[in-house]
Structure formats: C-alpha cells, structure tokens
Image (cartoon, rainbow, N blue to C red):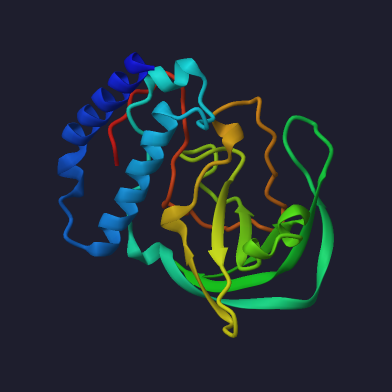
C-alpha cells in the first residue's frame, strides 16, 4: 500500500510539473476544461476504477484531447417528446441490446451546419430520480477513425427544468470505456445520431503504446 501511495504522488508530481505550462490560458472556461481533463487523466492512471489494464496505466502520461474551443460550446434547443420512446440500443461485444428511452432531440448550429441529435436515458437511470436531468447523447461525426474513436463518442447534457434550452459542450465529449478496454460493453451510437462535419473537440482516439503529453 505504501509503495502504491508513493507511486501515486510521484506520478502526480511529474504530471503537474510537465503540464503546468498547459494551464497558461487565463480564460476561466479553458482552465476549467483543463482541470477536468487533468482529474480524469489522474484517475485513469492510478485508480482501481480506471478502464485501463496494467499495461495501459503504465504507458499513460495523459489522454489526448483537442484544445478547448468555445465555438464547440453551443446553446441547443431541446424538444422533449410527450411520451418517451422505448428503444433497444445496440452495444459492443455482440451483447444483448440494452433498454433505453429516447426522450427527445437537441437542435443547434455548429460550424455553419444545422445539427440535430437524439437524447436518451437508460431504463435504469429513468427509474432513479437523481438522474432525472441527465441526458445521454451518443454520436458519430466525420473524425471517427481519423483522429477520434472509430465507434463514436458520448456527450452528456443537463436538462434545465422549465427551459427548452440546454448547453451542449462538445469540449467535454468523451470516449466509451470500450475504447480503452475491449472487455467493456458500450452503447453504439444510433445511425441517426451522426454529424456530417468534423467535430474537432473533446477527447481524441486512444492508442496503446503512445506516450502523450497533456493537452
């Protein structure tokens, strides 16, 4: 246990030292995004909850990300369905489809494109009041397999009670756990949730054997 703690603090010291210059932006939004990324990278490196195996943890310095860009933080219009649609969402590893509810769709403009993505909740989360404002948006775009995870990425959106507006911040979009470890079973973004543009924001593709610097 002591050895593990020593390695943990040694890693944090190295990472803080090598990435301090990356926090040079004075923009509070950019700083917050980078703090969140630093926290995630630290968890992936040392936590028992990390999806990485021992080899992945040993090789990882930091995950790769696009630089934060406020252009990819958009205000979207949320159209909730009067009655959520019960759907079966395909998942990886040829596992049985999982139960989800399609709650509605978000519409927004991005890079001159009119975009629309459906939002979901798993049946398990629908039954738990603490998740009632959490919307799940799995999507694909033109960067998949060309810089980002080939199977698409996930975005989380928070519903604001009494409002039809939500913030869709693609700087926070992330890879499913199966991108790091094939032992995980993950939802596959529905075909209708494709963006016909290069969404160069959020997390990039993860590759074993690539030693990366924090971005």
In the rendering, at what x and y percent does residue 93 appear? 74, 30
Q: State the quadrant of the N terminus.
A: top left
In the visual, does 24 lie left or right of 61?
A: left
The foreground one among 196 and 136 is 136
Seen at 40% across and 27% down, the residue is 46
* Residue 67 visible in the snapshot: no
Q: State the quadrant of the C terminus.
A: top left
The foreground one among 198 and 118 is 118
Seen at 51% across and 25% down, the residue is 52
Q: Residue furthest front?
A: 2
Above or below for 43 versus 174: above
Seen at 20% across and 48% down, the residue is 23
Q: Residue furthest bottom?
A: 162
In the rendering, at what x and y percent does residue 134 appear? 60, 63
In the visual, does 101 lie left or right of 135?
A: right
In the visual, does 3 lie left or right of 205?
A: left
Above or below for 6 versus 141: above
* Residue 104 visible in the snapshot: yes
In the rendering, at what x and y percent does residue 105 appear? 67, 70
In which quarter of the view is residue 187 placed? top right
Seen at 42% across and 35% down, the residue is 43
């Amino acid at each position: 246990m002591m050895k593990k703690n020593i390695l943990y603090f040694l890693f944090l010291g190295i990472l803080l030292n090598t990435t301090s210059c990356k926090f040079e932006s004075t923009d509070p939004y950019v700083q917050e995004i980078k703090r969140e990324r630093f926290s995630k990278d630290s968890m992936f490196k040392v936590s028992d909850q990390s999806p990485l195996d021992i080899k992945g943890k040993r090789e990882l310095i930091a995950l790769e990300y696009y630089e934060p860009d406020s252009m990819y933080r958009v205000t979207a219009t949320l159209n909730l369905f009067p009655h959520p649609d019960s759907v079966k969402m395909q998942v990886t590893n040829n596992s049985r489809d999982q139960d989800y509810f399609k709650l509605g769709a978000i519409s927004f403009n991005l890079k001159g494109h009119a975009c629309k993505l459906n939002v979901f909740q798993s049946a398990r989360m629908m039954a738990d009041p603490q998740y009632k404002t959490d919307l799940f948006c799995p999507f694909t775009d033109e960067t998949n397999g060309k810089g980002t995870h080939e199977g698409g990425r996930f975005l989380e959106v928070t519903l604001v009670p009494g409002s039809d507006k939500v913030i869709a911040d693609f700087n926070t979009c992330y890879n499913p756990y199966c991108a790091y470890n094939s032992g995980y079973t993950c939802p596959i973004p529905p075909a209708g949730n494709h963006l016909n543009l290069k969404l160069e924001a959020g997390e990039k593709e993860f590759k074993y054997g690539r030693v990366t610097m924090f971005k």
